[in-house]
Amino acid sequence: MAERVETDTVVVGLGAMGAQALWRLARRGVDAVGIEQFVPGHDRGSSHGESRIIRTAYMEGAGYVPLVKAAWHAWSELEEASGTRLVVPTGALMLGAPDSSAVTGSVDAAEHHGLPYQLLSHEQTVERFPQHAVGPGEVGVFEEEAGVVLPEAAIRAAVRLAGEAGARVLTGTRAARVVPDPDCPRVLLGDGTEIRARRVVVTAGSWLPRLVPEAAKPGGGLRVERRVLGWFRTTGVPSPHARGPVFARDAADCTWYGFPSMDGGRTVKIGVHAEAAGNRTEGAQWGEPVDPDTGPRAPDAADARRLGALAAGLRGVSALPERMVACMYTMTVDEHFLIGHLRELPGLVLAGGFSGHGYKFASAVGAALADLARDGRTDLLIDMFDPHRWD
Ligand SMILES: Cc1cc2nc3c(=O)[nH]c(=O)nc-3n(C[C@H](O)[C@H](O)[C@H](O)COP(=O)(O)OP(=O)(O)OC[C@H]3O[C@@H](n4cnc5c(N)ncnc54)[C@H](O)[C@@H]3O)c2cc1C
């Protein structure tokens, strides 16, 4: 028989953002229900693949720096509360031509906020980072305050802590509809259960456009796109990839990134963040749309060749990946996030459109969502993500 459940706040989608929001709400004593269609830490959304980069001198915009600083702090709180190591410090190397956005964007953000960084000449980069085949004319920006967040472990830790703090966690449960209302927004489940709340936080990732179509309209919409990650065997003993910084490289045809070995020197992982406009290279992933319910197309030989061509920019790795996974980006038009309220959707708090660079912020975004749900406002600097910014 259809049931009716009452609570203060419902969080729909316990991925990167929703798990953190639910934990923040529960530890503040808010009566909360979290709903996840799969199991926390699953591999069917945007938050799998073992590692995510966290950087501070943020090349995507100096405006992100206060939020990433808040995120570092909030990750430590989660590590402490869960007794789990979730962030591995490695430093970060941004590589590219002196006028590339990887280099100029990082320097701008560092200068703007007085962050420590080192601008390295071509020769210095070659000497200091032998694991990279540095191209002619390429230079580097190194920053210490960077590393790797462990995405699946962080989601599981936050959901576990939320449950221990009193949140009701419904896994394997799909929200069929979210009904906005200024006083009593509701979430309807497939079995007819209705969950009535004071606020509903919607953190449905790539499913956001389907679940709440109005949320996907600001600025011209959200696009769900396929991306592929590849793990390459290291060949040198000892491997120069056994430790070292995470990196992002601006190449002629794309921006790609990678991690030092997270498995004791056996493999390194790389991926393409963004293709250069009009790139027609075989395996280029730019813009390939995905239906989130079907999931992204499985990685194939063209993906392996494409990633292999990029891995040639690393020394001491195999020519082709030993394994690959596909994942989804949910892109906004300006590639900045959507966080906050929409007038058309009273009672709902939204967070989506993380455009392939949101994970590092999840700890702080969770805190901001808990503030917005409980108090209607937050001191965290999220104004630039206002869903009404295009009005
Ligand atoms: C390959 C790849 C590499 C990346 N690298 C980085 C990086 O290095 N650094 C970085 O900062 N960011 C990175 N990102 C981006 C980052 O991972 C994403 O921005 C972030 O994971 C998005 O989190 P989310 O909570 O919006 O989505 P998800 O984590 O996908 O969460 C959405 C959740 O909602 C659930 N859900 C959806 N609909 C429903 C429903 N109707 N009912 C119940 N549950 C529902 C889903 O099952 C899912 O668990 C990368 C992304 C990808 C794909």
Image: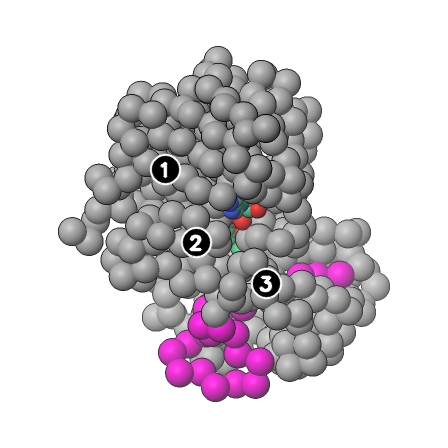
- Residue 291, visible in the rendered structure: yes
- Give percent across and percent down for residue 268: 70, 61
Does the magenta run of residues contain 283? Answer: yes
For the point 46% across and 62% down, the residue is: 224
Residues in magenta, as a range = 267-288
Respond yes or no on whether mark 2 lies under 8 Å from ligand 1.
Answer: yes
The Cα atoms of the two marked residues, 1 and 2, are separated by: 13 Å
Residue situated in front as seen by the camera: 368 or 169:
169
Q: Earlier in the sequence, mark 2 or mark 3?
A: 2
- Give percent across and percent down for residue 168: 58, 23
Does the magenta run of residues contain 232? Answer: no
User: Identity of the amino acid at label 2?
Assistant: Arg
For the point 61% across and 79% down, the residue is: 306
Q: Which residue is mark 2?
A: 210
Label 1–label 2 contact, CB within 8 A: no
Camera-side mark, 3 or 1: 1
Neighbour tally class for label 2: few under 14, some 14-19, many 20 plus, Cα within 10 Å = some
Residue situated in front as seen by the camera: 313 or 336:
336
Q: Which residue is mark 1?
A: 179
- Give percent across and percent down for residue 83: 68, 24
User: Identity of the amino acid at label 3?
Assistant: Thr
For the point 65% across and 40% down, the residue is: 172
Q: Secondary structure at mark 3?
A: loop
Q: Secondary structure at mark 2?
A: helix
User: Identity of the amino acid at label 1?
Assistant: Val
Neighbour tally class for label 3: few under 14, some 14-19, many 20 plus, Cα within 10 Å = few
Q: Earlier in the sequence, mark 3 or mark 1?
A: 1
Q: Residue furthest right?
A: 237
Label 3–label 1 contact, CB within 8 A: no
Mark on residue 294?
3
